[in-house]
Structures are given as structure tokens and as C-alpha cells.
Amino acid sequence: MKELELKYGCNPNQKPSRIFMEDGSELPIEVLNGKPGYINFLDAFNGWQLVSELKKATGLPAATSFKHVSPAGAAVGLPLTEVEAKIYWVDDLGDLSPLASAYARARGADRMSSFGDFIALSDVCDVDTANLIKREVSDGIIAPGYEPEALEILKSKRRGTYNIVKIDPSYVPAQKEVKQVYGISFEQGRNELNIDNDFLTQNIITDNKELPDSAKIDLIISLITLKYTQSNSVCYVKGGQAIGIGAGQQSRIHCTRLAGQKADNWFLRQNPKVLNLPFKEEIGRPDRDNAIDLYIGDEYEDLLAEGEWQRVFTSKPEVFTKEEKRAWLDKNTDVALGSDAFFPFPDNIERAFKSGVKYVAQPGGSKRDDLVTEAANKHNMVMCHTGIRLFHH
């Protein structure tokens, strides 16, 4: 198959639309089910690159949950804790395979953003992963292969229209990338940068230089995730998974705040007050996610108002006060933070500290590097200058 006609482009009025190989060669993908669209394929190809690099860098199965050409979450296949299994709504599935654990983590870190995602898996999709995906709202999946039973499970989604794409893992793209904007062609070399420990250990510029192996893995995950996130972007990571991604903001502090709030929400979901919310039995996972997001946010009164809470809960929950939330968030520690470009002001470090950040990787090169480093030293952080920028557009 040398080209694939699509229903339309980014929007229904943008026709005709297709994907094809300019050199006339075969496409490296096979559509096994459904009719993926233009944005689906943008998510699929960016997501596949991300999980492939995570697998190469860590040796672990990897998964990502993509929405509108940026990851909502990304993770490697480490075992889930009991609390993580509960907040990701997979505690009823028993022990999961490493690949299923990776997707549960990628999907679960920001379930609001992952609603209706496009999934990318580094490994052949197994039955555990397919069963998890089957019950989530998702647009499609790309993977290097599918176990026969897993493929049949996925084909049953969305009344048989679920988008399932198989990609050739041996495919090597051309060294030059070309795209058009306003009829004008842009050409650049592919971002083939291989992100590894060397970028983290060669230039640690803070007083604290103790960078444990677990933090190195988390920082590598953050940088690889940023490589495929629309810029400006920052990424908070803990325990092998992205817990907060701020994508496509014009100001870096807004990226840091946005991603930090997502990381805070991830940790707030683990508080006993949230874990024990008295949901009515018939309330489904997406509606529970929406309710939790309101409950832990500033607009909790909308959820707890008379006549509203009765729709969701069997009894009215207590208010999760600002003081209680701050006290709980102070328990979140050893978080890693990556940035796709330098921090121009120390306010980014101050905001990151509020979300438990201990380890930072950023390119360096700001006129105020000394002030940024001073802020990191004040909080006993470990910060390295990677010398690499990871803009993605």
C-alpha cells in the first residue's frame, strides 16, 4: 500500500486528504481495523516514536496516550502499587502484564486529557492490555503487532470500528523531513538525538550532585516525552511515568504551572478523602474522573452544591480544604522535571518545588542561569544542564 486516502484532514472541510510515501515506496503501516483519520495518524506516528525510544532507553515496555499531537501521558512497564491500581481504575483486573501496566500508568496519570486518546505501544499488544483498552474511551492504537486474541478484543470496540494500526518496527524514515505551510515547503534533518545518561551526568551545576539511578530513568523519560510534545513544554515524572505534561504554552512558566497542576492532581487522587469518595454504583469511570477533578479543584462547590452531589454520591463528601491539600502535596517528593528549553527565570524552579521536584534536566544557556541555579540550590535540588533543546512543532 503506497498511499491511504483519508476521510478528511484536520477538519471536515479540508479535502482531499491522504498519507503516502513521496518516493513511491510502501507505507510502513497496515490498517487492521477501522478508518483512522489525519489527526489519528499524526498522534500514531509521534506516539510510536516516543514509545520506541523509551523502550530503547530503558529496556522496558512503554506506552503513551496521545491527544492532539501531544502526549497526555507516557510510562514504562513497572508494577503498579495498590493505590495506583485504584486511582487508575484497574484494581479489579488483578496482576497486569508489564505492557498493560505501562498503558494503565500512561492513561491514568491524566485521565481527563486521555479521554478519547490514540494509544501507542512499544511491544506486541497482549490480552491484558487489550482488555484494559476495551473498556476505555479511545480512538485507536498503533503497535508493532497484536496477539490474535488481543486483536479480536480490540476489533469489538466501538461497534467494530475501532482504529487498529500495525507498524513495521524495522522501518527507518528518511533523514530529511519535509512539510508544507501556506504552500511553502519546509525541510529539516530528523531529530535523531539519542537521549541517554551522558546528557544528565556531564554537567550537574548544583551543589547537590547526587543523582540516583531511579532519577536518571525518570529524567530520561521526561526528555524523551518532551521530544514529541508540542513546545513550549515541560514534563514532571515520578516512578517511571509522566505525572504532568504542560504542552504548547507560549510562556515557560505557564508550562511549568500547567504541568505542575496536573502532577498535583495525580498525587491528590491518592489522598484517602479522594480514594474513599462515596460514588453511586452506577456512576461510570469517565463521570467519576470528572467528579474527582472538580472535587480536588478550586470549583469543588459546583460538585458539592445541594441537588448536585446527590446525582453522583450516596452521601455528601466533606470539603477537601486548601490546607489539607497543601499538607498532602508536601508529602510528594523526589519528582523529576525536564524542560525542552532553558528556564529564563527562577520562578519555574519555585513552582516546580511546590510539586515535589528534586531533580531537574534543562538545556541551560539563559542569561539568568545563575539565578535559576541559586533557586535550585536553595531547595537542595540536583540540576543538570543538558545542552540540548527539544523543540517540537
Image (cartoon, rainbow, N blue to C red):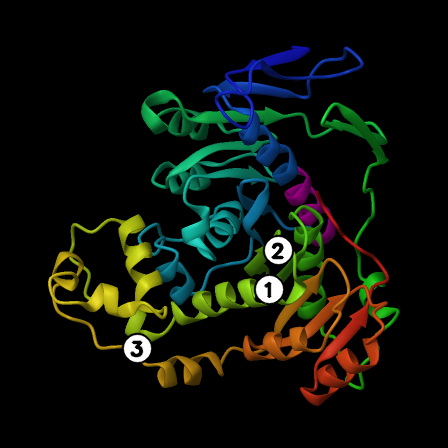
The type of residue carrying mark 2 is Gln
The type of residue carrying mark 1 is His
Q: Residue at x 37, y 81 (%)?
A: 322
Q: Residue at x 80, y 62 (%)?
A: 197
Q: Quadrant of residue 240?
A: bottom right
Q: Residue at x 55, y 57 (%)?
A: 78
Q: What secondary structure is found at the residue carrying circle 1?
A: helix
- Where is mark 1, residue-wise? 254
- As drawn, the label of residue 320 is 3
Label 1 – label 3 distance at C-alpha: 25 Å
Q: Residues within 10 Å of mark 3 (few under 14, many from 20)?
A: some
* Residue 108 coordinates in the image, percent (x, y): 44, 54
Looking at the magenta stretch, what is its main secondary structure?
A: helix
**Which mark lies nearer to you, 1 or 3?**
1
Furthest toward the bottom, the residue is 378
Label 1 – label 2 distance at C-alpha: 6 Å
In this rendering, position of residue 25 left or right of residue 168: right
Instruction: Give yes or no for contact between labels 1 and 2 (Cβ–Cβ under 8 Å).
Output: yes
Q: Quadrant of residue 28?
A: top right
- In primary-sequence order, the first of circles 1 and 2 is 2
- Where is mark 2, residue-wise? 249
In this rendering, position of residue 26 left or right of residue 96: right
**Magenta residues?**
49-58
Q: Residues within 10 Å of mark 1 (few under 14, many from 20)?
A: some
* Residue 373 coordinates in the image, percent (x, y): 78, 80
- The answer to whether residue 116 is above or below residue 78 is above
* Residue 300 coordinates in the image, percent (x, y): 29, 69
Q: What secondary structure is found at the residue carrying circle 3?
A: loop
The type of residue carrying mark 3 is Phe
